[in-house]
């Protein structure tokens, strides 16, 4: 079966800010087409946006995919952790790949700049958290270049306006999932994640500071590896940059990154939401290439 | 005026930790708890300067882990209630709050930046469900108007808080600022109102008086003012002033004076004074706890710490964002280098 002259069909489940921003990114992708944009209410702002873009929409939730299994080969799940736990077995039964943007964490934690190849063989991958996508590449580089990584800590600051009700209700899950991701990718003995919301106007860009305690810091080696990694990340998150470090200050390694979003559906300051979506799209495009899809004309 | 009661909550062993880089030890905690308990202090708060689960490279690591500090305090308090400060985003329910409650905490104060009360919902309702006394705390409260402060305090009330404390985390207020806010809160809430003063502009006691006069029923005070930056309302002075004004605190004057003497000897490297950078921190509206890291980093980058404070204030940096000090310092140092060329 040849896939070379068509795009990979995806469905987006969840019509909130994340889902709607994903839709715009998917429509722009030369590898992806959106077979269905699915939420719970046809009058939600995300649905209205999708309708205006001529996308097939449904308010039936996951039932739509069960009834119309041909609508997609892959599903982005941008609902909630609780919902994803119910959705995952259904995706499996239907043979749909799942990219999970909730903190449900059933599948392999995936950070495209670090473990894209490993993620390809999985049928359910989890995109960790926004802070995780921003900081894990740096934590990974610390783990690869330093010996005896005793501790890694990540402090993320995001604009208050980029934190919706779900984020605010789920700070504990955010912290736990980010800490688990940091540990897994860096091999550090202990990890800690902290989240600050800053209400300043104009809104602040997303930033993350990575601190590490290691036996004998090798800044040159770390800096070298980071340069290559950042280049890789910027291919899918153009607004990602290191704004400070790596330096050693007060006996800690410090690296600070800033993420400016693409400003698709969400404002550019919401780099936290952009980076997890960019990572999810990068993942889906890699699946598409793997399945033999060639890039098609960019229509939108 | 007579017979009005003020509850004194004493965060000497929590806020004071800022002044000694979170280095308070078990023996110090035990000694001060005994003294405050025998003086009749209503609530004794213990922990890292930024509260439960906040020991970190970002804010400084605690010499005494939370569980040990709490067990020690519990063993040395007989009549005073044991309190903790909890900031969602730092402390989680599973990792931090549950184990703390198991160690016998009586009062949980769940705190957020003044505009972000809704991140406290789960921590407040969980603590209520565990049957302890729960207050909401709105930090850096000078950054919003009395009306907006009330809106946020109402959210905390709706989550189950039994009172709301607003904090002058930068020591920015003058008495009439405090009065307006207490009036708005007392008027718009059906729960108790408390106030936590900082002394950057030398007004911690005057501001606390204004709060009591406007209807606040809980005030925070620390022995010798032991707290972040220029320190807090000085507990033993506050108790004496309230006594002169005719409020009852249930605290024995001689014994609280003894407790303050003990605190000076046993806890402090230096008694809090209003240093020049603290005046600037208060003017700039930056969290007082930034004093130590700003001073250290400004020295490393060879820049004026006062410039750092004003730049942090301009950027509206909130408590907990200590990492940004480094970024600001780097930027100021680069600017200075360019200016020299």
Image: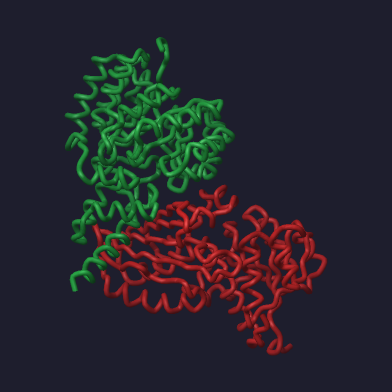
Q: How is the image coloured?
A: by chain
Picture coordinates of residue B46, whole percent (x, y):
35, 33
- Determine the residue located farthest toward the top in the rendered image: B2
Depth check, front residue: A284 or B76? A284
Quadrant of the image for the N terminus of chain A? Answer: bottom right
- Determine the residue located farthest toward the front in the rendered image: B176
Q: Is residue B6 left or right of residue A51?
A: left
Residue A34: which quarter of the image? Answer: bottom right
Residue A286: which quarter of the image? Answer: bottom right
Residue B170: which quarter of the image? Answer: top left
* Chain identifier for the red-coloured part of the image: A
Residue at (43, 64) in percent of width and height: A135
Residue at (20, 44) in percent of width and height: B276
Quadrant of the image for the C terminus of chain A? Answer: bottom right
Residue B126 visible in rendering:
no
Depth check, front residue: A47 or B9? A47
Q: Is residue B39 above or below residue A266?
A: above
Residue at (38, 70) in percent of width and height: A242
* Chain identifier for the green-coloured part of the image: B
Depth check, front residue: A163 or A127? A163
Picture coordinates of residue A6, whole percent (x, y):
71, 85
Q: Is residue B45 above or below residue B339?
A: above
Residue at (50, 69) in percent of width and height: A111
Picture coordinates of residue B153, whole percent (x, y):
52, 35
Q: How many marks?
A: 0
Residue A135 visible in rendering:
yes
Picture coordinates of residue A141, whole percent (x, y):
38, 70
Q: Is residue A260 above or below residue B56?
A: below
């Amino acid at each position: 079966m040849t896939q070379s002259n068509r795009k990979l069909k995806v469905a987006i489940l969840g019509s909130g800010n994340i889902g709607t921003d994903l839709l715009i990114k998917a429509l722009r992708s030369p590898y992806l087409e959106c077979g269905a944009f699915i939420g719970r209410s046809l009058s939600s702002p995300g649905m209205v946006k999708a309708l205006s873009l001529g996308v097939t929409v449904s308010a039936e939730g996951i039932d739509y995919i069960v009834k119309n299994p041909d609508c997609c080969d892959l599903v982005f799940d941008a609902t909630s952790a609780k919902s994803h736990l119910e959705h995952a077995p259904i995706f499996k039964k239907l043979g749909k790949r799942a990219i999970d943007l909730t903190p449900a964490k059933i599948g392999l934690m995936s950070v495209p700049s670090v473990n894209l190849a490993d993620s390809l063989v999985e049928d359910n991958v989890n995109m960790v958290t926004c802070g995780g996508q921003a900081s894990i590449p740096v934590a990974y580089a610390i783990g690869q270049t330093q010996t005896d990584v005793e501790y890694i800590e990540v402090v993320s600051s995001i604009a208050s306006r980029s934190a919706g009700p779900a984020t605010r209700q789920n700070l504990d899950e955010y912290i736990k999932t980010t800490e688990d991701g940091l540990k897994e990718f860096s091999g550090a003995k202990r990890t800690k994640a902290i989240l600050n919301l800053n209400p300043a106007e104009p809104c602040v860009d997303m930033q993350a500071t990575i601190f590490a305690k290691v036996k004998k810091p090798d800044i040159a080696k770390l800096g070298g590896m980071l340069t290559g990694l950042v280049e890789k990340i910027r291919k899918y998150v153009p607004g990602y940059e290191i704004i400070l470090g790596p330096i050693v200050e007060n006996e800690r390694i410090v690296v600070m990154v800033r993420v400016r979003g693409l400003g698709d559906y969400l404002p550019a300051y919401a780099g936290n939401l952009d980076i997890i979506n960019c990572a999810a799209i990068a993942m889906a495009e890699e699946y598409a290439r793997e399945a033999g899809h060639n890039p098609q004309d960019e229509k939108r | 005026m007579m017979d009005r009661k003020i509850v004194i909550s004493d965060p000497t062993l929590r806020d004071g930790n800022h002044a000694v880089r979170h280095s308070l030890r078990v023996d110090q905690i035990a000694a001060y708890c005994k003294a405050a308990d025998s003086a009749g202090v209503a609530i004794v708060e213990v922990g890292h300067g930024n509260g439960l689960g906040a020991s970190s490279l970002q804010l400084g690591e605690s010499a005494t882990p939370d569980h040990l500090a709490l067990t020690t305090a519990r063993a040395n308090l007989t009549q005073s209630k044991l309190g903790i400060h909890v900031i969602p985003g730092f402390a989680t329910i599973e990792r931090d709050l549950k184990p703390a409650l198991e160690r016998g905490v009586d009062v949980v104060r769940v705190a957020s930046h003044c505009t972000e009360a809704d991140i406290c919902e789960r921590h407040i309702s969980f603590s209520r469900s565990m049957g302890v006394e729960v207050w909401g705390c709105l930090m850096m409260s000078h950054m919003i108007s009395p009306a907006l402060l009330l809106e946020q305090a109402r959210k905390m009330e709706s989550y189950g808080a039994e009172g709301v404390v607003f904090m002058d985390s930068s020591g920015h207020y003058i008495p009439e600022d405090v009065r307006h806010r207490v009036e708005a809160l007392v008027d718009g809430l059906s729960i108790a109102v408390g106030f936590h003063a900082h002394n950057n502009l030398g007004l911690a006691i005057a501001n606390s008086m204004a709060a009591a006069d406007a209807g606040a029923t809980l005030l925070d005070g620390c022995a010798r003012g032991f707290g972040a930056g220029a320190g807090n309302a000085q507990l033993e002075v506050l108790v004496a002033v309230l006594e002169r004004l005719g409020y009852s605190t249930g605290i024995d004057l001689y014994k609280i004076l003894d407790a303050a003497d003990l605190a000076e000897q046993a806890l402090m490297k230096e008694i809090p004074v209003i240093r020049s950078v603290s005046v600037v921190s208060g003017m700039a509206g930056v969290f007082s706890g930034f004093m130590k890291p700003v001073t250290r980093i400004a020295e490393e980058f060879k820049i004026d710490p006062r410039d750092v404070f004003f730049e942090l204030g301009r950027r509206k940096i909130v408590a907990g964002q200590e990492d940004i000090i480094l970024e600001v310092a780097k930027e100021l140092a680069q600017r200075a280098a360019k200016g020299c060329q």
